[in-house]
Amino acid sequence: MLSRIHHVGVVVPDLDAGLRFWRDTLGLHFTKSATIQEQGVRAALLKIGESEIELLEPINAESGVAKFLARRGGGLHHVCFQTDDVERELEAARARGIQLIDQKPRHGLAGMICFLHPKATRGVLVEYAQPAD
Ligand code: CO
């Protein structure tokens, strides 16, 4: 079951500059950051109430995030819904005929994650996440 908006993904050209704004200027609480090689990004999570903002900086030119940055100059990238069972949620999406980016869940900064295809969601990139804790 999808339970809440876990985070909103924001693409930035420079993660440190992004943190200076979102953490230092806006005052959001820094949770963690990591480099996720498979996705070609450096990412950071910042907590605001029950939800988070996920900053994404591309580390190569090939990733979807890099292409998004080149095309749009960064900004709002995706919405992530929390689930207690990402495998089951992905199966349910597949069964409903929703086009997928990920055929099976993979590791992300927010836990085990998967993405639905923006073509199937009227242009909004949707992520499902099952947090590790
Ligand atoms: Co995300």
Image (cartoon, grey):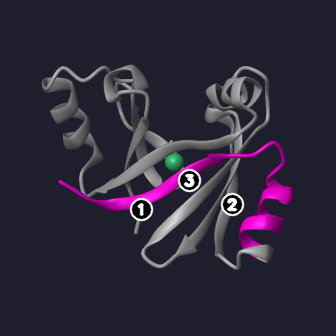
Q: In this view, does 92 lie above or below 119?
A: below
Q: What stretch is highlighted in magenta?
A: 1-23
Residue 133 within the magenta-colored segment of the rendering: no
Lower position in the chain sequence, tag 2 or tag 3:
2
Q: Is residue 68 above or below residue 56?
A: above
Q: Is residue 37 left or right of residue 61?
A: left
For marks 1 and 2, give the one nearer the viewer: 2
Q: Which residue is drawn at 44% across and 47% down?
A: 79
**Quarter assignment of residue 101:** top left
Image disc number at residue 33: 2
Amino acid type of the residue that numbered disc 2 sits on in the rendered structure: Ser
Mark 2 and mark 3: Cα distance apart in space:
8 Å
On the image, numbered disc 3 is attached to which residue?
A: 109
Say if mark 1 contacts mark 2, CB within 8 Å: no
Q: In this view, does 76 lie above or below 28?
A: above
Q: Can you give x and y, in whole percent of width and height, for residue 71 in the image?
A: 71, 23
Q: Can you give x and y, in whole percent of width and height, for residue 109 in the image?
A: 56, 53
Say if mark 2 contacts mark 3, CB within 8 Å: yes
On the image, numbered disc 1 is attached to which residue?
A: 132
Amino acid type of the residue that numbered disc 3 sits on in the rendered structure: Leu
Amino acid type of the residue that numbered disc 1 sits on in the rendered structure: Ala
Q: Is mark 3 within 8 Å of ligand 1?
A: yes
Q: Which residue is drawn at 34% across and 23% down?
A: 100
